[in-house]
Image: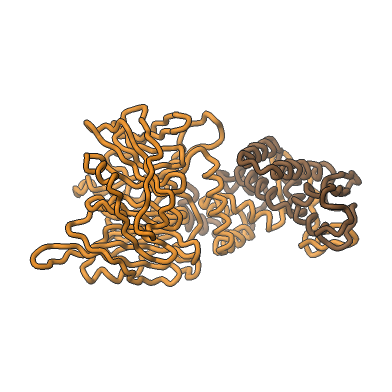
Amino acid sequence: LTIYSANCLERNPKEQPPPLFIAMAGSIICDLPEGALVEIFSWLPPESLMRFKCVSKSWYALINSVIKNPEFVNKHLHNVNTISSSSTSSLVFCCVSFAYCRHPKMESLRQRLFKVVTVFHDHHNEWNSRNFVRERFRLPTLPSELNLAHAKRSHCNGIICLAQGETIVLCNPAIMEWRTLPKPCLDNNGFIPLGVVFGYDSRANDYKVVRFEHYRLLRDQVEYFKIGAEVYSLRSDSWKEVGIQLELDRFPHVGEEVFCKGVFYWFVWTHDIIVSFNMFDEVFHSIPLPDDLIVVTRKGHSAQLAVWNNSVALFLFKQEKAVTKSIQVWATDDCSGGVNGSCSWIKKLTITPPVDVAFPLAFLKNDELLMQAATKTFILYNIRSQMIRELSFMEVPRSSVDWDYSYVKSLLSVHGGTQPR
Amino acid sequence: MSSSSTTTTTTRLLMLKASDGVTFEVEEAVATKLGAINNMVEEEGSEDLICLPNVNGKFLGMVLEWCKKHANNNTNSDKGNDEVNKWWDKEFVMDLDQNTLYHLLMAADYLSGTELVDLLTEKVASMIRGKKVEEIRETFKIKSDFLPGQEEEIRKKNSWAFE
C-alpha cells in the first residue's frame, strides 16, 4: 500500500505523480495509473477489449496480458454478472437449428446462419425501456463433422458446449475461440448420449463436461437400458468414467436439464425419475417423483424441470387445444441432489398466463417467467407486477429457433487458461 | 483496533486535511470505508488529523459524501438497503462530467476506496464501451505508435470485433 509518514498519506515516489490535469472539451484520462485502467477494462465487453488493442502499443500489450490473467478474467466475469443482474432481465440466446433445411439448395443459408448465435438482453437504463437489444456473435469455424442441428447444447460463464456423437466442442464466441475436446471414453462401448452438459465446479475451480448416456442390452430377449456417465475436466484435459447404478426397462426420454447449486438435474419423464449429478463430488443420484406428483403427471399433465428461488422446481401444466391455461410450480425445500434418496415437493405457485401460451420454458429471474406463446412468439411474464412482454424475432424462421437462457459474455478461454495455443 | 482512548460507544472523529488546506471532520466509521484511512487508523498511536496532500477539497468532499452514505446505509441491516445503495450510486455518477469523474477516480484509487473505484470505473466503461478506436484515442489523448502495417494486422486478426 501507499507509504505514509507522520500521519501524511503520500504517494509512493516510484509511482507517477498525480497529473496536472486540465479538462479539455470532450477529453479525459490521459495518464490514469495502469491499475485504474485495468479496472475500467474489467467492465468492458470482450469485443470492445479486442477492438481497443488497436489503440496503441501499450494498450495492445496491456490488454493481451490481462486477458491471460485468470484473476482478471474472473473479476471480469463477476462484473458481467453484476451488470446483468441489475438489469431487469437476464440474457437470452438463441441458436438456429437446422433439422428443417437439409436440402442441398439450403446449404448456403445453413452455412450463413450456422455461424450466428443471437443474444437478446434488456437495455437496462430506463424504467419503461422494454426493448430487448439484439447482439450477434459469429461462431468460430467449427469442425465440419459437427452438425449443429443435432448437437446438444449447454453453456456456462460464456463458454458454449456443442456435442454430437463423439465430437464435443467448446467455444467462446465472444473471444472467437473454439476447441475440440478429446474423444469421450465410453463411446466405443456402444453408449449413446442422453444429455451432455457443461458447468462449473466452484470448489475445484474447474469446468467440467458431463455426458450422461445409455446403452441398449438384451437379457432373455427383453431389452433394457444400462445408464453410464463420464466427466471431462478442463483442468486435467481428460475424461473419466463415473459410477451410476441405474438400469431402465425401456428407452428413457430425458427433458431439458437444469443446474442448481452445483448440481445438474434431468427429468426422465418415461420413468418418473429425476437424475442428478453433483459437480463437486461427481456422484449421480436417481430421485423418484413422489406418488402424488406421479398421479398428476399420469392425468395428462406435462412436467418440466425449472429453477425457482434458488431451488429445483417442476412446472406442471396441461395443454388443451395447444393452450396452457394454468401452470403449477412445485419446488423442493432442500433437495441437495437427492442424496437422501428422495425430495419433498411443495406446491408453491399457480400461475394463470394472461394470454394464450403453449407452455412454460423457464424462470429468467424469480419473478420473470419465459413462455412459448401459442402463436410461436415468446412471452416474458412478470408474475409479481403482471407485466407482459412479447419477444419476437423477425430475421430467423420461428420454427427453427432453439433457446437457452442467461448467457453471459466472458473472456474465459476454452483452453482452461493454462494451455494457450 | 484503534489505540485511541475513546470507548467503543463514543464515535471517534477524524480530521482529514486536503491538499488545498480544506479540512473535513468525519466519523471514523465513515472515513474507514477508505482502505488507506483504515490502515492509518489501525496503526498504533495514530492521531486524529490526517493530511491528504494528493486530493483537493472538492473531490475529497465528494468521496466522503459517498462514504457517509454507504456507512449509514450499512449500519441498519435492512434487506432493501442494497437496492437503496444501488439507486443512490446511480444518482451519484449520473451527471458527473469527465473531468470530475477523472479526479474522483484518481482520489478513490489513491485512498483505496475499492467499492467507489468499482462504481467509477464501471461508469467510465459504460461511456467508452461502444466507441471506435479513433474515439478512444481522442478521449484518452493517445497517439497511435504502431509501425505502418502493424495496426492493420491486429485489425485483421480481430476483424469480428470491428463489425
Is residue B20 something that shows in the picture?
Answer: yes
Q: In the rendered image of this protein, does residue A405 appear above or below residue A64?
A: above
B53 shown above or below A123? below
User: Picture coordinates of residue B136 (x, y %)?
Assistant: 62, 47
Q: Quadrant of residue B84?
A: top right
B146 vs B160, left or right, is right
Number of numbered callouts drawn: 0
Determine if residue B141 is in view.
no
Image quadrant containing the N terminus of chain A: bottom right
Residue at 23% across, 71% down: A188
For the point 32% across and 50% down, the residue is: A256
Chain letter for brown, please: B
Q: Colour of chain A?
A: orange
The answer to which quarter of the image holds residue A286 is bottom left
Residue beneath the point at 48% across and 30% down: A385
Q: In screen coordinates, is A230 left or right of A383?
A: left
Residue found at x 58% / y 49%: B133
Q: Report the colour scheme.
A: by chain
Q: Left of B94 or right of it: where is A396?
A: left
**Could you say which is closer to the camera, residue A137 or residue A221?**
A221
State left or right for residue B118 relative to residue A44.
right
Pick the residue in front: B146 or A190. A190
> Residue A300: percent from the left, percent from the top?
22, 39
Q: Residue A82 location, x and y as percent? A: 56, 47
Q: Residue furthest left?
A: A221
User: What is the x, y in percent for residue A77?
Assistant: 53, 54
